[in-house]
Image (cartoon, rainbow, N blue to C red):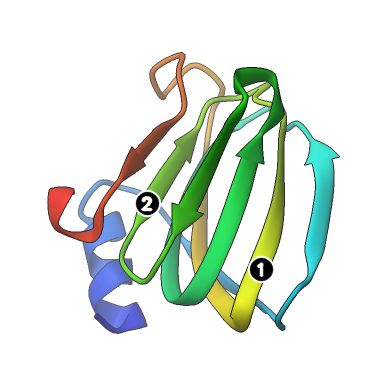
Amino acid sequence: MNDGTLERRLASESLDAHPWSNGPGVVYGVHRHDFDKVIVAAAGSIEFDLVERGERVDLAPGDRLELPAGTAHGATVGSAGVTCLEAHRPAGTLPDEPRRLSAGDW
């Protein structure tokens, strides 16, 4: 699935997604946002650590993670690097719990 297809799918939900990329092994420390976040892996892989929930969420191309505002999370980029599309929404737009959707489920 290419970025254009993913961007169109997100746009159909009125989500204005912006791409970002990182090389292999980049680590994001645990942090929170004051907005809801939708992240879709376009290439490569990334693992999110939802520390307060004791969960790890792996994203491969086409997979989506919805993070409500205030969700503590960190991330580690996979061995091939990653390109993601990310969109922000006002806090309270998403359900209260993080949700992972496989490529074929959204």
Q: Quadrant of residue 94?
A: top left
> Camera-side residue: 6 or 82?
82
Residue 66 on image: x %, y %: 44, 38
| Direction from residue 98 to residue 102 in the image, left or right | left
Q: Residues within 10 Å of mark 2 (few under 14, many from 20)?
A: many
Q: Quadrant of residue 73?
A: top right
Task: Give the amino acid at mark 1.
Answer: Val
Q: Which residue carries the number 2 mark?
A: 64
Of the numbered discs in the image, which one, if any, rests on residue 47? none
Give the number of the mark in front: 2 or 1. Answer: 1
| Direction from residue 18 to residue 51 in the image, left or right | right
Q: CA distance from mark 2 to mark 1?
A: 15 Å
Task: Give the amino acid at mark 2.
Answer: Arg
Residue 68 on image: x %, y %: 53, 26
| Direction from residue 30 to residue 68 in the image, left or right | left
Q: Is residue 69 above or below residue 84?
A: above
Residue at left offset 14%, top offset 57%: 104
Q: Is residue 28 above or below residue 13?
A: below
Q: Is residue 18 above or below residue 2?
A: above
| Quadrant where the N terminus is found in the figure | bottom left
Residue at left offset 36%, top offset 71%: 61
Contact between labelled residues 1 and 2, with CB atoms less than 8 Å apart: no
Residue at left offset 29%, top offset 84%: 2
Residue at left offset 29%, top offset 58%: 11
Q: Secondary structure at mark 2?
A: strand
Residue 49 on image: x %, y %: 65, 41
Q: Residues within 10 Å of mark 1 (few under 14, many from 20)?
A: many
Q: Quadrant of residue 42?
A: bottom left
Q: Secondary structure at mark 1?
A: strand
Q: Which residue carries the number 1 mark?
A: 77
